[in-house]
């Protein structure tokens, strides 16, 4: 279906030779052509195509042109079998074809990211004893590294003292404990959508399951080895945490593979009181980059943080201007996702 031709005000923008394939799912139109995948959002929250705004259509078409321009540069192309990226020849729609080790990327039913729905998810209320707990080290320091100039920086904690506590730990109600391994940004668009709407960026805090388990804790064999906490950004005021990150990778625009050591406090980026006061989505999904490993525990906050347009541009420039987000995967049953609302336990 040529979705752009179904939108009256968009018809003049589409040339006859354009081939656009689309799917309308939960107030979001996913479109793809030879240059990649892009999105249209239904601002009216209805399935009527007239609800899609001209501004959104125009920005989507600009996104196509930009991705095509990036793809035309030799440095942006896949240069080896299995090399993945975000350009048409090695991007998300091709990942499963690039390597036998990437086959899971085609398994939409269990993959991440997804469109998160407050109304269609399984509604759950949890009290303090059942909620996850995030514990931070306000003195934590991080250093950004990346494998190539078209990849984003991943910021891993750096211990400056042997006895220094982990940068962050995540405690689950079943006794599982995770320590922060790294965090990274997906820029120019968020990966998850919430009620069909996407942000301008998304940060993922990736945690690894602690190998040492207390004697009184028995974890299931299927306990995810990794957990990810996600926060979406919307356009707004500048974020001090993001400023700190950007200052540490200023040389990324010139192709540097490592950033400077920087002190960051995760409290500045996560919603206040995190899980104890903020609704969040919880589900078991996958990594959003190859090899798209599954059985990853996901937590995504409903509340968004803000990032200024200048910060978005600078973050994009720090990774060679490459937008690094994976499109939403539509195969999952929304009821497999829990929408959790924290509640205070009543005094007895």
Image: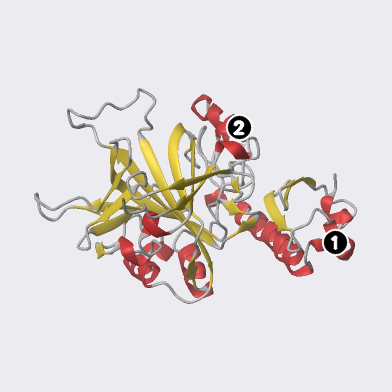
269 sits left or right of 158 in the view:
right
**Residue in view at x 49 percent, y 61 percent:** 303
Q: Say which residue label 2 marks.
A: 109
Task: Count neighbours of disc 1 (C-alpha within 10 A) and say few if under 14, some if 14 to 19, many if 20 or more.
Answer: some
**Residue in view at x 27 percent, y 63 percent:** 260
Q: Which mark is residue 100?
A: none
* Front residue of this view, candidates 84 and 297: 297
**Residue 339: percent from the left, percent from the top?**
53, 47
130 sits left or right of 44 in the view:
left
Q: Say which residue label 1 marks.
A: 50
**Residue 231: percent from the left, percent from the top?**
46, 57
Query: SS of the residue at dot 2?
Result: helix
Q: Is residue 28 above or below residue 176?
A: below
Question: Which quadrant, please, contains the N terminus?
Answer: top right
- State whether residue 153 appears in this view: no
Measured Cα–Cα span from mark 1 to mark 2: 30 Å
Tally the numbered discs.
2
């Amino acid at each position: 279906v040529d979705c752009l031709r179904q939108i009256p005000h968009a018809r003049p923008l589409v040339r006859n030779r354009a081939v656009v394939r689309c799917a309308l799912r939960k107030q979001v139109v996913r479109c793809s052509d030879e240059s990649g995948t892009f999105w249209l959002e239904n601002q009216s929250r209805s399935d009527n195509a007239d609800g899609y705004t001209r501004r959104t259509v125009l920005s989507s078409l600009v996104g196509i042109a930009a991705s095509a321009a990036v793809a035309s540069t030799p440095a942006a192309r896949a240069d080896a079998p299995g090399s993945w990226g975000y350009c048409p020849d090695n991007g998300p729609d091709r990942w499963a074809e690039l390597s036998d080790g990437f086959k899971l990327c085609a398994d939409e039913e269990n993959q991440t990211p997804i469109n998160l729905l407050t109304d269609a998810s399984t509604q759950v209320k949890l009290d303090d004893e059942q909620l996850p707990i995030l514990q931070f080290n306000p003195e934590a320091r991080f250093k950004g590294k990346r494998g190539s100039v078209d990849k984003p920086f991943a910021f891993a904690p750096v211990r400056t003292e042997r006895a220094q506590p982990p940068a962050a730990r995540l405690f689950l109600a079943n006794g599982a404990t995770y320590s922060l391994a790294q965090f990274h940004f997906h820029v120019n668009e968020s990966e998850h959508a919430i009620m069909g709407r996407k942000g301008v960026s998304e940060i993922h805090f990736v945690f690894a399951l602690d190998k040492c388990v207390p004697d009184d804790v028995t974890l299931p064999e299927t306990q995810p080895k990794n957990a990810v906490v996600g926060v979406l950004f919307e356009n707004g005021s500048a974020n001090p945490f993001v400023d700190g990150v950007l200052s540490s990778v200023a040389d990324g625009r010139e192709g540097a593979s490592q950033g400077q050591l920087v002190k960051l406090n995760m409290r500045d980026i996560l919603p206040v009181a995190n899980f104890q006061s903020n609704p969040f989505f919880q589900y078991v999904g996958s990594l959003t980059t190859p090899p798209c490993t599954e059985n990853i525990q996901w937590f995504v906050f409903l509340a968004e943080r803000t990032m200024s347009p200048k910060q978005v541009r600078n973050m994009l420039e720090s990774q060679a201007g490459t937008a690094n987000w994976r499109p939403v995967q539509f195969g999952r049953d929304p009821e497999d996702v829990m929408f959790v609302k924290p509640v205070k336990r009543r005094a007895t």
